Amino acid sequence: MTSRKTLLAIIVILIVVASYIAVDHYVSSNKQNVELVVCNAGSLTIPLQKIADDYQKRTGVKVLLEPSGSVDAVRKVTDLHKTCDIVAVADYRLIPMYMYPNYTKWYIEFASNKLVIVMGQGIKGNHNLSSVLNDMLNPNIKYGFSDPNRDPCGYRSVGVIGLLSLYFNNMSLLENLVIQKIPGSTYNLTNGTLNIYVPPSFAPTGNLVIRPKSVQLLSLLESGELDYAFEYQSVAVQHNLTYVTLPDIANLGNPVYAQNYSKVVVHILVGTENEKAIAMAPIVYGLTVPVTAKHPDEALGLVKYILENGRTVFNSLGQPFLNKPIGSGAIPEGLVGLVEESSGKS
């Protein structure tokens, strides 16, 4: 009798173990069929790809990055109704600005950056900021930045030129480098605030070169077709490019100067229903999982993995991770302990 009970117990255990193995195999194979689509800022591509490759090795979940300008990234969801499992942008403010409340109700700020001026292969010798700005005023020297209407690096570049104009008390910098080169653009300086208005479509003139996203300028710099470009410092570091730093009071990288940055406001897509007034502020990246995500659980898993394991990767690539990521809105329960609650900004 005892032996029969023992045999039955063994059979039951084997059945339970087999069922667990079957379920685990199903889950694993099922995850291998999951492909997360991440609509991300171009400047996030290299660090996110490193993290995504490691995440796939650990979980079997495939991650497909779709780099673009950040404004384009959010509008893929809101205007084109594309299925993006994660939206990761170079300016966290774009998420509440364009995606609240219909496409998401939360976001997380997680990394920072600053703007620099990168030098092309054709520029030789040592240069400082003054000599570079003087070079850009030369009609034979080509300089560039990304499209302000499509990419945060673009409207930040315009804003930084405005800040430099205020810093040097020389509005001709803004007039010569932006207003005269972007047909239809205007500006006014009222009560200490500089407003710059960018039309929804334009063809740059003279020696200004514009591309949809900032990383698309790199090949022109490397080939010598472009002499200077406004880029994120992380992009310069990741591509081993020579660059000139900007003063903290104008580079959007130092929170101490947040109030000074806000003195410049760039208005994008002027005259359209998507027109936005964007005050300059310290650069902070943000991400969210849209309510339209095809794989929301796996997407949250990747977000959690970024928050728990991304610090070393981002720091090593010139994009400092925030000391404590900041969560705003209805943060999903599984992420709550990984972020600091927002003080109410949007």
Image (cartoon, helix red, strand yellow):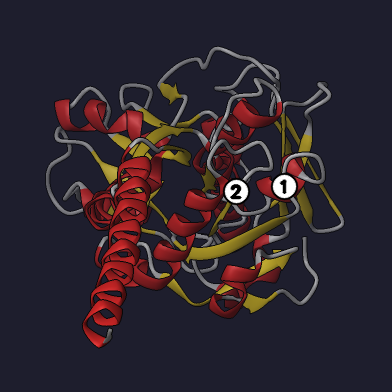
Q: Which mark is residue 312?
A: none
The residue type indicated by label 2 comes to: Val
Q: Which residue is mark 2?
A: 289
Rendered residue at 48%/69% (across/down): 248
Q: Residue at x 58, y 80 (%)?
A: 337
Looking at this view, is 143 or 77 the one in front? 77
Q: Is 130 on the left or on the right of 195, as rendered?
A: left
Residue 16 rendering spot, x and y as whole percentages: 35, 65
| Numbered mark located on residue 104 in the image | 1
Q: Which of the 4 quarters of the picture holds residue 277?
A: top right
Q: Quadrant of residue 314?
A: bottom left
Quarter placement of the C terminus:
bottom right
Q: Earlier in the sequence, mark 2 or mark 1?
A: 1
149 vs 6, nearest the viewer: 6
Res. 24 visible in picture: yes
Percent from the top left, x then y, of residue 182? 59, 21
- Front-most of 172 and 44? 44
* Image position of 77 (left or right of 68): right
Labels 2 & 1 near each other (Cβ < 8 A): yes
Give coordinates of residue 303: x percent, y percent.
48, 58
Q: Which secondary structure, mark 2?
A: loop
Q: CA distance from mark 2 to mark 1?
A: 7 Å
Does residue 15 sit above or below 184 in this rendering? below
